[in-house]
Amino acid sequence: MKKVIGKILIVIFIVLLSFALIIVGTGYNMYKEAIDKTPLDEKVSQIKEKDNYTTLDEMPDIYKKAVVAVEDHRFYTHGGIDIIAIGRAIWNDIKTMSLAEGGSTITQQLAKNIYFTQEKEFTRKVAEVFMAFKIEDKYSKNEILELYLNTSYFGDGYETVKEASRGYFGKDPLELTDYEAVMLAGIPNAPSVYAPTINLELAKQRAKQVIEAMVKYNVIPEEDANKLLKEGEEYSLSYQSYRAQKLVA
């Protein structure tokens, strides 16, 4: 009986290994096809030619820190993929029998934004990993963050930080209050839900999640977080007033 079980386990292992090799091979071919069609340098040049391309120097420090905290808090220490996040995502996906959680780093999200679709499938995820390694090899962390923030969608047709800042708050990025910067950092996770023009209360709830992440990963102290949360409690009236004035104008 033990021999039979052992043989079955070996067969299962071989099948799973074969399946994994097929997925990796297909994903690599997808990556190669994409990079051969449009080299990375060319893609980056196209991004930097966008209207209202926003450099990191044009963004508030708290905004950049908020993005890293909520999207990929190990961004400055990993090499393109986060093994810990991937392991957690795989475990949660197995439990839910879905691809609900991806474990993608900022670099992987950049790869997806500029080369691949938003569909959740194994081969695309593998291609994304290969592309992330390529991006990390060619660009610095700050360059990657800047490119990511200029390829994220903020809703309402806004595709750069500058467009979103002006569109949602009527200000250039460096003029944002700390709370507005935190709110802006949370929008790309689900722009159709968290855009303040769609649902200000949900946008505030998302901003609270961002603030909690910043505290959790020691980006800001609890005292500063409390100040931001207090500003958030009082923000609805001032934002509604701004939107009313904008509509009249």
Image (cartoon, grey):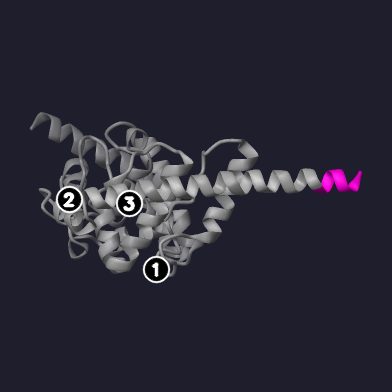
Front-most of residues 197 and 154: 154
Residue 3 among magenta residues: yes
- Calculate the distance from the C-alpha at mark 3 to the C-alpha at mark 2: 33 Å
Residue sitting at x 27%, y 42%:
154
Helix, strand or loop for disc 2? helix
Q: Do callouts 1 and 2 mark residues in contact (Cβ within 8 Å)?
A: no
Mark 2, residue position: 162
Q: Is residue 243 above or below residue 129?
A: above
Q: Position of residue 42 (x, y in %)?
A: 17, 55
Residues shaded magenta: 1-6
Q: Amino acid at mark 1?
A: Tyr
The earlier-in-sequence mark between 1 and 2 is 1
Question: In the displayed structure, does residue 182 sit left or right of residue 121?
Answer: left
Helix, strand or loop for disc 1? loop
- Calculate the distance from the C-alpha at mark 1 to the C-alpha at mark 2: 24 Å
Count of marks placed on residues:
3
Residue found at the very far left of the displayed protein: 249
Residue sitting at x 30%, y 37%:
196
